[in-house]
Each structure stands twice: as C-alpha cells, then as structure tokens.
Amino acid sequence: MTHTLAIIKPDAVASGRAGAILAHLEKGGFTVQALRMTRLNPAQARAFYAVHKERPFYESLVSFMTSGPVIPMVLEAENAVPALRKAIGATDPAEAEEGTVRALYAESKERNAIHASDSDENARNEIGFFFSQSELLAL
Ligand code: CMP
C-alpha cells in the first residue's frame, strides 16, 4: 500500500459535492488516512503551486484556490499515486473519462473539483505541506 494527497477544491466544497467525491473515492478502493478542512492564504497557494508560477493561469489558480475552504486528505491504496490520477480523470473535465471524479463533479479546467499528487516524491512533499507528523500517526 502507498499514499497520495488529494485536495477537494473550493468549487466542490462550495457546491456541496465534497461528500459525494469522498464516497466515490472510498467506493473506488481508497482509504482515508488523514483529512481536514482549511482555507489557504495566497502565500500558501502560491507555494503549493510554485511549479506552475510561469504559467498564464497561475494568478487565477491562486485566486481560485484561496476563494474558500478546501479539504486535503491522505489516501491509501495499492499504487495510490497512479490509481488516484486514473480515478480523477483529465485536468479538463470535458476530456475526463466517463465515471471519473472530474467527469462527474468538475466545472471547468480550472474549477476541476480535485487535485491529486503526480509522483511519489510530490505526494510525500504535499502530504507534509498539509499534515503534521502527529496527524499522520496511522501511516
Ligand atoms: P491541478 O491538478 O490541481 O494542478 C494544477 C491546476 O491548475 C489544475 O489542477 C487546474 O485547477 C489548473 N489548471 C491547469 N491547467 C489550466 C488551464 N489551462 N487553465 C486554467 N487552469 C488550469
């Protein structure tokens, strides 16, 4: 079993889809190992998405990610990183495979309901970004 980080984004939290997304992931075989609700400030959102800082959508992404509460969580599964990427679907919900979280619950390429780590190394870093050691005792 390995771990990855998911974030239910402000669009999905605000529209009341967080519970459905969580249920979808649990039915898909992921177990929740840690979870909380928080609101990112601009510095945190910029740091989290620093890899995208040269992209034209960066400021808009920071503004969106700070627009309301988010729900970061640590998920466990076999090959959790690729498994979660598959379960959430393509960045753009119009291109996401049927039955994926984004096909079902995302609004647009930016307001796309959920984030998932894209490598084991990023998963470790992103888990550390949101959770302290004492919140990760179950791991
Ligand atoms: P995420 O998987 O969290 O990683 C980076 C985020 O940037 C992505 O989901 C989207 O929310 C956003 N994003 C990526 N590409 C675009 C784009 N072309 N236009 C607007 N937002 C984007």
Image (cartoon, rainbow, N blue to C red):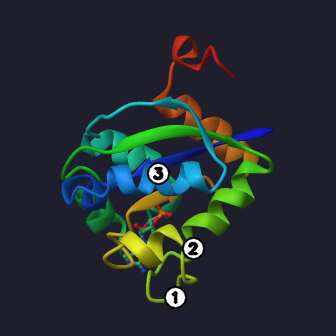
The answer to whether residue 38 is above or below residue 9 is above
In terms of image quadrants, where is residue 11? bottom left
Instruction: Report the disc number at residue 89.
Output: 2
In terms of image quadrants, where is residue 128? top right
Which residue is depicted at the point 29% across and 64% down? 59
Q: Nearer the viewer, mark 3 or mark 1?
A: 3
Q: Are marks 3 and 1 in contact (CB under 8 Å)?
A: no
Image location of residue 37, percent across then percent down: 32, 34
Instruction: Report the disc number at residue 126.
Output: none
Q: CA distance from mark 3 to mark 2?
A: 16 Å
Q: Residues within 10 Å of mark 2 (few under 14, many from 20)?
A: many
Q: Are marks 2 and 1 in contact (CB under 8 Å)?
A: yes
The answer to whether residue 137 is above or below residue 24 is above
SS for dot 3: helix
Instruction: Evaluate whether residue 19 shows in this view.
Output: yes
Image location of residue 114, percent across then percent down: 44, 59
Question: Mark 1 = which residue?
Answer: 95
Image location of residue 85, percent across then percent down: 64, 63
Question: Mark 3 = which residue?
Answer: 23
Q: Are marks 3 and 2 in contact (CB under 8 Å)?
A: no
The amino acid type of the residue labelled 1 equals Glu
Considering the image in quadrants, where does the C terminus appear?
top right
Q: CA distance from mark 2 to mark 1?
A: 8 Å
The residue lying toward the viewer, choosing from 20 and 46, is 20
For the image shown, how many numbered marks are present on the structure? Answer: 3
